[in-house]
Image (tube, rainbow, N blue to C red):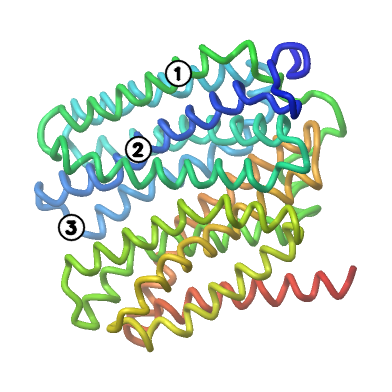
């Protein structure tokens, strides 16, 4: 089964049905996964669990990403991408049901680890499908749309708790139903999806590290930036005397910018190139890190955070576009698996490192740490341009 033979296309030759199915799948999956983080934290807090243990519990999911990543390319090629995605979505539903049944932080740690293991293949396979199906001329817009939808799904997940609450089975059922729906969407479009690439030079994740270290550092930067901001911005705002309601609204604006601006950045990448756009995103994010302490208490902080959210996650979107430009075949799925591994590392290490910086130099350690990351990425991108 190949995309050309099984996927109906429009006048432009773009397989819209398959792409819509892929994006819908990942958006529903992201909603379910985004719901789990605040839901389980609220429950653990009500049980009197210490903050350190709550944080350790949350770290189990990105650990699952890290551990599972090296096995995904071979597994997807052997089992098939659609079968693997359906299986992982159903297993994620069972894992979430088990978490709902066993209200114990010690049992939750291996179960949350398994959630990461089951989630990771679906993201890797979906991104591989999407890059393989997308014409180069439209890659920026379509991958930007993909990033926007994933971000939107993660944002809607926590918001859904406002409708169903955090007590009882209702929130767990929302996540379980979403995981099952995800498997059904994949099943519905399975015949339109391309096979996982078998052609081309066999490349391991280690090979991607040697061939594209700067791309992987960009993924690390985006992951560490996003996780650190979401985890520690409340601490930063509280230290500056801001109310919880204002801090929550500012975080929402940041996430909204993340979701809304990816299509715009993707269009810019089509015109200017992904590498140049990534450099612009890194420099803009650095500038906003420097500006944040000056405008936090004033009205400009609102548009600043909106754009900041967009350009910081835009680094990942540009890395994904450049991955599709540089790799095909087996190297492409290996590259997506390497992205997932590095995203997990960035998610696990960014917040603790920044928390330590804030403990040592005060609350301004947050923009200082994020700014240092962006500066390092921008510097490396400039050096790469000079070597070309």
Please give the name of the residue rendered at 28% of the width and 83% of the height, measured from the top-left corner. Answer: 297
Judged by depth in the image, the label closer to the viewer, 3 or 1, is: 1
Mark 3 or 2, nearer chain start: 3
In the figure, is residue 194 to the left or right of 178? right
Assess whether mark 2 and mark 1 are in contact (beta carbons under 8 angstroms): no
Separation of residues labelled 1 and 2 (CA atoms): 19 Å
Quadrant hosting residue 128: top right
Assess whether mark 1 and mark 3 are in contact (beta carbons under 8 angstroms): no
Residue found at the very far right of the displayed protein: 388
Q: Which residue is mark 2?
A: 112
Q: Nearer the viewer, residue 194 or 81?
A: 194
Q: Is residue 314 above or below residue 157?
A: below
Mark 3 or 1, nearer chain start: 3
Mark 2 closeness class: few <14, some 14–19, many ≥20 residues within 10 Å:
many
Mark 1 or 2, nearer chain start: 2
Please give the name of the residue rendered at 45% of the width and 18% of the height, measured from the top-left corner. Answer: 183
Where is residue 342 drawn, in percent x and y?
58, 52
Q: Nearer the viewer, residue 191 or 116?
A: 191
- Location of the N terminus by quadrant is top right
Where is residue 110 drawn, in percent x and y?
35, 36
Q: Which residue is mark 3?
A: 50
Please give the name of the residue rendered at 45% of the width and 35% of the height, measured from the top-left corner. Answer: 27
Mark 1 closeness class: few <14, some 14–19, many ≥20 residues within 10 Å:
many
Quadrant hosting residue 135: top right
Q: Nearer the viewer, residue 114 or 181?
A: 181
- Residue 183's mark? 1
Where is residue 195 drawn, in percent x and y?
71, 19
Judged by depth in the image, the label closer to the viewer, 1 or 2, is: 1
In the figure, is residue 235 to the left or right of 4? left
Separation of residues labelled 3 and 2 (CA atoms): 18 Å
Q: Is residue 279 above or below residue 342?
A: below
Where is residue 67 drawn, in percent x and y?
53, 40
């Amino acid at each position: 089964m190949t995309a050309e033979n099984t996927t109906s296309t429009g006048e432009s030759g773009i397989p819209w049905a398959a792409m819509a199915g892929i994006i819908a799948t990942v958006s529903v999956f992201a909603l379910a996964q985004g719901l789990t983080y605040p839901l389980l934290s609220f429950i653990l807090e009500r049980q009197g669990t210490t903050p350190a243990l709550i944080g350790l519990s949350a770290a189990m999911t990105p650990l699952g990403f890290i551990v599972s990543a090296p096995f995904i390319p071979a597994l997807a090629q052997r089992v098939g991408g659609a079968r693997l995605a359906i299986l992982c979505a159903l297993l994620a539903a069972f894992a979430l049901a088990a978490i709902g049944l066993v209200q114990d932080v010690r049992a939750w740690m291996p179960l949350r680890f398994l959630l990461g293991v089951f989630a990771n293949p679906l993201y890797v396979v979906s991104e591989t499908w999407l890059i393989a199906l997308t014409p180069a001329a439209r890659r920026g817009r379509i991958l930007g749309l993909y990033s926007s939808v994933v971000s939107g799904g993660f944002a809607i997940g926590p918001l859904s708790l406002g409708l169903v609450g955090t007590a009882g089975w209702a929130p767990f059922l929302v996540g379980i139903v979403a995981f099952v729906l995800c498997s059904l969407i994949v099943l519905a479009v399975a015949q339109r999806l391309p096979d996982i690439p078998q052609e081309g030079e066999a490349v391991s994740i280690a090979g991607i590290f040697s061939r594209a270290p700067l791309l992987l550092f960009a993924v690390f930067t985006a992951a560490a930036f996003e996780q650190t901001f979401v985890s520690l911005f409340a601490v930063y705002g509280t230290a500056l005397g801001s109310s919880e309601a204002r801090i929550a609204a500012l975080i929402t604006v940041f996430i909204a910018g993340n979701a809304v601006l990816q299509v715009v950045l993707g269009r810019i990448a089509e015109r200017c190139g992904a590498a140049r756009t990534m450099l612009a995103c890194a420099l803009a994010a650095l500038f906003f890190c420097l500006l944040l302490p000056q405008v936090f208490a004033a009205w400009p902080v609102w548009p600043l955070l909106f754009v900041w959210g967009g350009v910081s996650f835009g680094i990942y979107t540009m890395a994904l576009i450049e991955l599709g430009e540089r790799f095909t075949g087996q190297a492409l799925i290996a590259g997506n698996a390497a992205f997932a591994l590095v995203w997990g590392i960035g998610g696990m290490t960014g917040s603790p490192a920044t928390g330590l910086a804030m403990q040592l130099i005060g609350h301004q350690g947050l923009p200082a740490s994020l700014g240092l990351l962006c500066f390092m990425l921008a510097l490396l991108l400039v050096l790469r341009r000079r070597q070309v």
